[in-house]
Image (cartoon, helix red, strand yellow):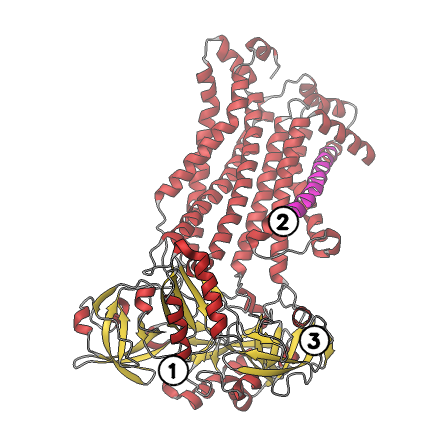
C-alpha cells in the first residue's frame, strides 16, 4: 500500500511539473535558510563548552556609576587578582590575564632583524591559567608551565611559524613590548578552535611582565584597564552570590567607602561571556541571545512562507484532481487513505527539497561565510544535531505544508467531484488562503522594512561627520616613547613631500582604545569634579587630525603639562556652555597634575557612533603609543614605503603595524554591515517565496472564477476590467499585510536603533517605500497569470462545470 502511495505520488508530481518545481523551489529556499540559521546558532552556542570546569569559571567584571554615568567594563586594576586571593574566600584559583601590550614582536635570540614575528593573540597569565582553561597538550606540563618568570606556552601554529617544528621545549624567544623580555618555551598546545573566546597563540607567565616593569599604573588600585582581566575558579558548591557579596569589603579596603558606593565588581559566568554585549571578548565577537532568537524566528518564518506557497498551489490544483478524488472514493477509498496519499506527495516533495537544501547549504556557505566573518562546520553526517534538526524540519514541513491540502482534497463529494461540479462550499477556502497570503506578505514586508532601515543606518555611519579628517591618514603603533627617537622619526618623515604631518598620541582620534579618569575643575565661582576621556597628543595632534579650534590656541612644543585643550562637551559639563573664551586660563587637575586650559576644540567622536560624545581633555604629557601620519594621496605608495623604512630604522626590533584610519573606522561598523548583508539575503529569499505564493493564489482565483470571467467577456467586459478583479484583491491583501507588518517592524527596529547613540529617525518614508515596492512586486508577479485568464476563450470557460 505504501509503495503504491509513493508510486502514484511521483506520477502526479511529474504530471503537474510546473507546480512541483515551484513547490520544491520554495521549500528548498526556506529549508536552506533554516539550515544556515541552525548552523550559525549551533556555532555560537558551542563557544567554550568543552572546558571541564566551565560551570565554575567566572570573569570578574566592573560596574561603575561615578557622577551618575553607568559604565560596564570587563577589566579592573592589575592588583585585583592578588586582592581576591588574599581577601575573598570560596575561590580555588585566581588568574590575571594581561593583554596590555598590543601585538608584541617576537624574535629568536640568534636571529637577524629580518626574522620578526608580530602576534596580536598574545597574553601573559598567572600560573593557574591552565587549571581554568583546557588545551590539548603536545608537550610540557600544564601544572607548572607558567610557574616561573620568563616562561611561555605556544601553540602548534606559532611554533611552526617561528621555529619550523613543535619540538621546541627549552628553546628561547625574545618578546619586545617596549623593552625585550627573554622567554623560555615550557609547553606546546594545539591551536584554540575557532569557537573559542580565548584565541591566544602565545601565553606567557604574567610575572615576566611585572618584574620587567613595563606596565603603567600597575601598583595603583585606582588604575583600571580592560586589558587586565581577572578570572576565578570557584570551589565546589560555592555560588556566584557568595563571592559577589564580598567585593564591597574588598573595594572599601583598597579604595575607601566612598568609592565602594559607586563601584562594584561581580562575577560573569564563563558560559555567558560570548552573549553579553555589555562587555567584550578577546576575539571581539559578542552575540546576544536575543539575536540568536531573532535568527531562529526568521528561519522559521521563511519555512512557514514556503509552506504557505505549498498550500496555495496544491489547493489551486484541487479542481483538476477532483475526478481522481471522486474515483478513489467511489472505488472504496476512505478519507484517511486519501489523506495519507496526499501527505505522501508532500513528503516526497519535502524530501527532495531537503536534499536540494543540504546541497545548496554546502554551496552557499562559501558565499555566506565571508559575510558572517567566520567559518561554519560542514558535513551533515558528522553533525548529529544537524541530522536531528533535518528530521524535525522534514516532519514539521510535511505536516505544515501537506495537512490542509490533504484534508481539503479528501473531503470532496465523490459524485460532484467526478462531474467536476464542486459547490461553493469547496471553494470557500479562499478566505483561508487569503489569510495565508496576508501572513506571507506581512513577513516579507516586515523584512523589507527592517532591511531598508538597517541599510540607512549603515549608510549614516559611513557618511556622518566625526569632527576629524579621517582620509589619507595612516596610524602606526610605536613600541616606546623615547623623545629623541620620536623626534628624529618625525623629522625624517616630514622631510618627504609624500607626508604632510606627523603626530604622536596615546590612542589617536577615533579609536576603541579609550583612556579616561576623573578631573577636578578649579574656578573662582565653580568647582566641578567629574569624569572625562584623556588624549595624550603632541603639538601636531590638532592639525594632523583636522580638529577645529573654537577658542584659544594650540599648546606649544615647549609645553609639557602646563597646558590643556578641552572640547565643547567638557565646556558644557563644567557649566560654561558655549562661552568658550571665558573657559581659557581656568585650571584643571587631571590624574594629579594641574594645568591651564589654553584652547577649546570642536567636539569629535573619540569612539564609534554607538557611543555618545564625551568630555575630552587633550594634554601634551608624554605617554605616546601611536603615531598619526597625514599622507599625500598622490604619493601613497611612496609614503608607505618611507614609513616602513623609517620605522625599521628607528625600531629595528619591531614591526610597522600600520592601518588607514578610514578603514579602521569602517571596521567599527562591521557588525551592522554584516547584519545588512544577511538581511538582504533573507529579504530577497522572502520576496521570491512571496512571489511564488502569489502565483498560487492567483492560480486558485483564476480557476474558481473561470465561468465568471467568461460571462463578463461575453457581456463585453474589457481586459482592463477583468484584470481589476485580480488587482483589487492584490491591493487589499498587500494593504492588510502592511498594517500588520509595519508596527512589528517599527517595534523591532526601534529596539535595534536604541543600541546607538547616533541614529536615523524612523521615517514614514521607509514604511511607505516598503509598501509601494511590495505592491509593485505583487502586480508584476500576478501579471502573467491574470492576463492569461483575461485572454482565455469565454466559450471554453462557460463549458466548465463549476
Q: Is residue 419 left or right of residue 737?
A: right
Q: Residues within 10 Å of mark 2 (few under 14, many from 20)?
A: few
- Residue closest to the eye, 676 or 102: 102
Q: Is residue 426 left or right of residue 507?
A: right
Determine the residue positioned at 49% across, 57% down.
671
Residue holding disc 3: 188
Q: Is residue 584 left or right of residue 128?
A: left
Q: Quadrant of the C terminus?
A: top right
Which is more foreground, mark 1 or mark 2?
2
Determine the residue positioned at 65% across, 27% down.
18
Percent across and percent down for residue 633 are 39, 55
Under circle 2, the secondary element is helix
For marks 2 and 3, the one nearer the N-term is 3
- Is 22 drawn above or below residue 213 in the view shown? above
Magenta stretch, overall SS: helix
Mark identifier at residue 261: 1
Residue holding disc 2: 366
Which is more foreground, mark 2 or mark 3?
3
Determine the residue positioned at 62% across, 14% down.
801
- Is 710 drawn above or below residue 652 in the view shown? above
Percent across and percent down for residue 394 are 69, 44
Marks 2 and 3: CB-CB under 8 Å?
no
Q: Which residues are magenta?
A: 341-364
CA distance for labels 1 and 3 = 45 Å
Amino acid at each position: 500500500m505504501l509503495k503504491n502511495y509513493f508510486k502514484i505520488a511521483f506520477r502526479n508530481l511529474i504530471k503537474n511539473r510546473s507546480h512541483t518545481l515551484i513547490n520544491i523551489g520554495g521549500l528548498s529556499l526556506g529549508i536552506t535558510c533554516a539550515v544556515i540559521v541552525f548552523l550559525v546558532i549551533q556555532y555560537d552556542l558551542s563557544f567554550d563548552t568543552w572546558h571541564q570546569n566551565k560551570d565554575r569559571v567566572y570573569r570578574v567584571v566592573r560596574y561603575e556609576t561615578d557622577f551618575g554615568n553607568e559604565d560596564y567594563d570587563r577589566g579592573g586594576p592589575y592588583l585585583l587578582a592578588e586582592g581576591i586571593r588574599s581577601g575573598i574566600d570560596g575561590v580555588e584559583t585566581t588568574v590575571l590575564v594581561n593583554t596590555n601590550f598590543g601585538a608584541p614582536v617576537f624574535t629568536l635570540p640568534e636571529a637577524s632583524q629580518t626574522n620578526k614575528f608580530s602576534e596580536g593573540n598574545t597574553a601573559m597569565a598567572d600560573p593557574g591559567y591552565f587549571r581554568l582553561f583546557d588545551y590539548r597538550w603536545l608537550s610540557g606540563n600544564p601544572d607548572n608551565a607558567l610557574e616561573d618568570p620568563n616562561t611561555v606556552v605556544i601553540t602548534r601554529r606559532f611554533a611552526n611559524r617561528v621555529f619550523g617544528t613543535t619540538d621546541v621545549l627549552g628553546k628561547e624567544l625574545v618578546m619586545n613590548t617596549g623593552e625585550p623580555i627573554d622567554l623560555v618555551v615550557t609547553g606546546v598546545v594545539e591551536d584554540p578552535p575557532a569557537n573559542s573566546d580565548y584565541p591566544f597563540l602565545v601565553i606567557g607567565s604574567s610575572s615576566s611582565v611585572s618584574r620587567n616593569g613595563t606596565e603603567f599604573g600597575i601598583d595603583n588600585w585606582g588604575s583600571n584597564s580592560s586589558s587586565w582581566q581577572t578570572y576565578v575558579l570557584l570551589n565546589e558548591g560555592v555560588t556566584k552570590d557568595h563571592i559577589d557579596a564580598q567585593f564591597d569589603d574588598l573595594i572599601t579596603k583598597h579604595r575607601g567607602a566612598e568609592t565602594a558606593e559607586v563601584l562594584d565588581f561581580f562575577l560573569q559566568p564563563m558560559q555567558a561571556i560570548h552573549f553579553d554585549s555589555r562587555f567584550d571578548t578577546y576575539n571581539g565577537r559578542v552575540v546576544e541571545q536575543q539575536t540568536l532568537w531573532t535568527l531562529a524566528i526568521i528561519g522559521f518564518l521563511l519555512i512557514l512562507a514556503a509552506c504557505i506557497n505549498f498550500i496555495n498551489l496544491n489547493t489551486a490544483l484541487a479542481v483538476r484532481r477532483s475526478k481522481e478524488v471522486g474515483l478513489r472514493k467511489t472505488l472504496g477509498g476512505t478519507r484517511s487513505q486519501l489523506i495519507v496519499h496526499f501527505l505522501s506527495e508532500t513528503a516526497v516533495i519535502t524530501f527532495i527539497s531537503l536534499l536540494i537544501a543540504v546541497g545548496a547549504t554546502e554551496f552557499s556557505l562559501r558565499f555566506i561565510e565571508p559575510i558572517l566573518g567566520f567559518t561554519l562546520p560542514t558535513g551533515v553526517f558528522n553533525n548529529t544535531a544537524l541530522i536531528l534538526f533535518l528530521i524535525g524540519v522534514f516532519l514539521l514541513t510535511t505536516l505544515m505544508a501537506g495537512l490542509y491540502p490533504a484534508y481539503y482534497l479528501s473531503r470532496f463529494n465523490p459524485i460532484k467531484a467526478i462531474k467536476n461540479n464542486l459547490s461553493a462550499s469547496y471553494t470557500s477556502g479562499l478566505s483561508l488562503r487569503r489569510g495565508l497570503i496576508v501572513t506571507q506578505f506581512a513577513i516579507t514586508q516586515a523584512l523589507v522594512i527592517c532591511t531598508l532601515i538597517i541599510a540607512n543606518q549603515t549608510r549614516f555611519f559611513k557618511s556622518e561627520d566625526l569632527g576629524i579628517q579621517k582620509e589619507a591618514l595612516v596610524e602606526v603603533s610605536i613600541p616606546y616613547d623615547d623623545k629623541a627617537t620620536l623626534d628624529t622619526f618625525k623629522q625624517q618623515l616630514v622631510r618627504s613631500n609624500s607626508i604632510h604631518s606627523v603626530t604622536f598620541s596615546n590612542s589617536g582620534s577615533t579609536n576603541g582604545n579609550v583612556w579616561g579618569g576623573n578631573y577636578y575643575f578649579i574656578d573662582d565661582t565653580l568647582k566641578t569634579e567629574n569624569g572625562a576621556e584623556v588624549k595624550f597628543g603632541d603639538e601636531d595632534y590638532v592639525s594632523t587630525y583636522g580638529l577645529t579650534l573654537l577658542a584659544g590656541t594650540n599648546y606649544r612644543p615647549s609645553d609639557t603639562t602646563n597646558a590643556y585643550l578641552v572640547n565643547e562637551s567638557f565646556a558644557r559639563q563644567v557649566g560654561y556652555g558655549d562661552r568658550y573664551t571665558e573657559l581659557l586660563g581656568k585650571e584643571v587637575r587631571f590624574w594629579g597634575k594641574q594645568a591651564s586650559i589654553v584652547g577649546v576644540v570642536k567636539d569629535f567622536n573619540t569612539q564609534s557612533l554607538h557611543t555618545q560624545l564625551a568630555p575630552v581633555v587633550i594634554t601634551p604629557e608624554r605617554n605616546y603609543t601611536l603615531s598619526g601620519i597625514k599622507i599625500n594621496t598622490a604619493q601613497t605608495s611612496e609614503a608607505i614605503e618611507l614609513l616602513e623604512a623609517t620605522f625599521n630604522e628607528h625600531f629595528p626590533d619591531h614591526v610597522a603595524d600600520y592601518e588607514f584610519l578610514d578603514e579602521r573606522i569602517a571596521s567599527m561598523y562591521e557588525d551592522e554591515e554584516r547584519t545588512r548583508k544577511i538581511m538582504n539575503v533573507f529579504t530577497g529569499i522572502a520576496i521570491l517565496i512571496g512571489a511564488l505564493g502569489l502565483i498560487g493564489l492567483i492560480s486558485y482565483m483564476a480557476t474558481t472564477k473561470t465561468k465568471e470571467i467568461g460571462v463578463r467577456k461575453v457581456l463585453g467586459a474589457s481586459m482592463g476590467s477583468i484584470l481589476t478583479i485580480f488587482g483589487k484583491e492584490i491591493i487589499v491583501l498587500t494593504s492588510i499585510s502592511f498594517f500588520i507588518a509595519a508596527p512589528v517592524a517599527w517595534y523591532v527596529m526601534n529596539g535595534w536603533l536604541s543600541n546607538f547613540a547616533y541614529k536615523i529617525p524612523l521615517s514614514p518614508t521607509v514604511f511607505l517605500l516598503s509598501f509601494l515596492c511590495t505592491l509593485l512586486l505583487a502586480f508584476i508577479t500576478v501579471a502573467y497569470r491574470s492576463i492569461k485568464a483575461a485572454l482565455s476563450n469565454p466559450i471554453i470557460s462557460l463549458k466548465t462545470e463549476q
